[in-house]
Image (cartoon, rainbow, N blue to C red):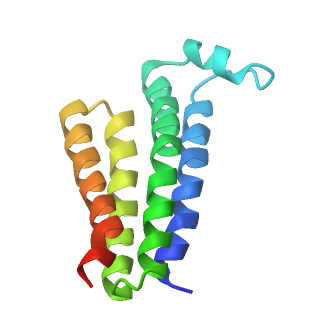
Amino acid sequence: MPLAYWCILVAAMLPIFWAAVAKSGGDVDNHRPRESTANLPPMYRRAYAAHYNAYENFPFFAAAVIIAVTQGAAIVTVNWLAVAYIVLRFAHGVAYVLNYCTVRSGIFGLALLANLAIFLLPAFK
């Protein structure tokens, strides 16, 4: 199985990781978690926002990797780009939590470019 497929698994787990970080910051009522996160300290609310952002970005990444692999893109390139995407998405979450908004936006853009490259690789084989 290609490394890029394992990266899909990691990307699927990133939202859960950021949710755990958010919930570690205070008293979150698990009966109403979305309502109670509004009462978290700012850093932990940002972790919850990173949680949502990771979920929002997951489908395109998963689809891009599967499309690239099944359409015969160079697997080494797909693997490298997928790992780069994972590293960038983790860094995006860290920048989000630490409130480095300009850095976060730049990292978001780089991760998006990596994802677009993965998606477009089969067109250039």
Q: Looking at the picture, how far across and down is residue 30, in whole percent?
A: 77, 26
Q: Looking at the picture, how far across and down is residue 10, in whole percent?
A: 54, 63
Report which quarter residue 20 is drawn in: top right
Residue at the spot 35% in from the left edge and 66% down from the top edge? 119
Residue at the spot 27% in from the left edge and 66% down from the top edge? 117
**Residue placed furthest toward the right:** 31
Report which quarter residue 35 is drawn in: top right
Observer-nearest residue: 87 or 123? 123
* Image quadrant occupied by the N terminus: bottom right
Q: Looking at the picture, how far across and down is residue 21, in whole percent?
A: 55, 39
Seen in the image, is 93 located left or right of residue 95?
Answer: right
Q: Is residue 20 above or below residue 80?
A: above
* Image quadrant occupied by the C terminus: bottom left
Q: Looking at the picture, how far across and down is residue 77, in whole percent?
A: 30, 81
Q: Is residue 45 above or below residue 20?
A: above
Observer-nearest residue: 41 or 19? 19
Q: How many marks?
A: 0
Residue at the spot 28% in from the left edge and 45% down from the top edge? 108
Q: Is residue 24 above or below residue 88?
A: above
Observer-nearest residue: 119 or 15? 119
Residue at the spot 58% in from the left edge and 65% down from the top edge? 9
Seen in the image, is 82 located left or right of residue 51?
Answer: left
